[in-house]
Image (cartoon, grey):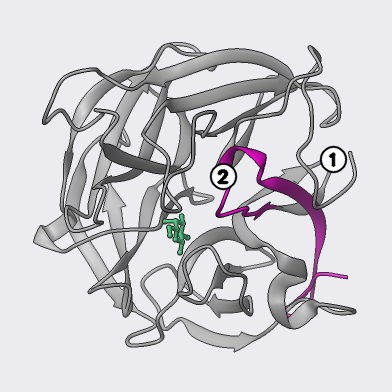
Amino acid sequence: MKNGTLWTDTDGKGIQAHGGCILEHEGTYYWYGENKDTETQNRRVDFVGFSCYSSRDLIRWENHGLVLSSVREEGHDLSPASVGERPTVLYNAKTGKFVMWFHQDSADYTRARVGLAVSDSPAGPFLYQGSQRPGNHDSRDMAAFIDENGKAYLFCSSDWNATMRIWELDGTYTCLTGNGKEILIDQAREAPAVFFQDGKYFMVSSGCTGWKPNTMLFAAADSMFGSWRLIDDPCTGPNARTTFGAQSAAVFQAKGQWYLLLDHWNPDNLRESGYSILPVICRDGSLTIP
Ligand code: GAL
């Protein structure tokens, strides 16, 4: 698994889990992401669906196929002509359900909604529940996050990506309560990935340059609806200013260490886009990605 390349699964096939997330459940890691295994035309692929892979060691990944598939019906949210990106799956310990939130959009990115799908098991299938604009605001790149106290939130790039909005979810993680907050106003951040460590909330994010790599920055806050401040680029070493040619997807923890999953987009052949997993070092309220 060389960082920056397209990794293969246990069948030797390229892993199709772009813009993904990794969830640990009962000792197994589940990797969900965009299946882009179709022709790229004008830097886009038709919506195929979201895949799921599982692994015990983060190296050997077994393919569970599409857990939410495109629907061959004109005008359907999941039609091939639509966009489905950045699925994040949350496990709800109270309901026992796996809740997937994702960026649902039209090919021209003007629909700008969040989509929801729910499953009884980590490897799917997920049942589609519909889409919405949180608080009537547009929402594009997004992430979902569970706090220490079990409350969950969505982080959505909003106002044409100028401002981020946090939205609180209810106890089932399937409904928005309506409580929210604008953060990083006019800072134009996308590709958010959120985690909590030593009493602080952290978010890494990218700038808004489409498939082209730019500078990652991290932000921190003392409370969820507190004041989020952009702090610095956590990346160090060669190509740090372009996030090593990649873009953030999700942060996850394995054996007490934080890791960042990244995408190395190949805009002319999106299914060939590679991945990296890098350690995230969190010390004295600051982040470093060596
Ligand atoms: C990026 C975004 C990706 C995808 C892409 C399309 O900025 O992070 O998820 O939407 O734009 O150009």
Which amino acid type is shown beneath numbered disc 2?
A: Leu
User: Helix, strand or loop at disc 1?
Assistant: loop
Residue 46 x, y percent position in the rendering: 37, 35
Residue sitting nearer the eye, 290 or 253? 290
Mark 1 near mark 2, Cβ–Cβ under 8 Å? Answer: no
**Ligand 1 within 8 Å of the CB at mark 1:** no
Task: Residue at 46%, 17% (x, y): give it.
Answer: 67
Residue 113 x, y percent position in the rendering: 22, 50
Residue sitting nearer the eye, 221 or 154? 154
Q: Quadrant of the N terminus?
A: top right
Residue sitting nearer the eye, 267 or 251? 267
- Ligand 1 positioned in quadrant: bottom left
Q: Quadrant of the C terminus?
A: bottom right
- Quarter holding residue 227: bottom left
Relative to 59, residue 43 above or below: below
Residue at the disc numbered 2? 270
In the image, taking residue 225 as reference, residue 123 lies left or right, namely: right
Residue at the disc numbered 1? 255
Relative to 117, residue 104 above or below: below
Residue 149 x, y percent position in the rendering: 47, 48
In the image, the segment drawn in magenta is 262-290
Q: Earlier in the sequence, mark 1 or mark 2?
A: 1
User: Helix, strand or loop at disc 2?
Assistant: helix
Number of numbered discs overlaid on the protein picture: 2
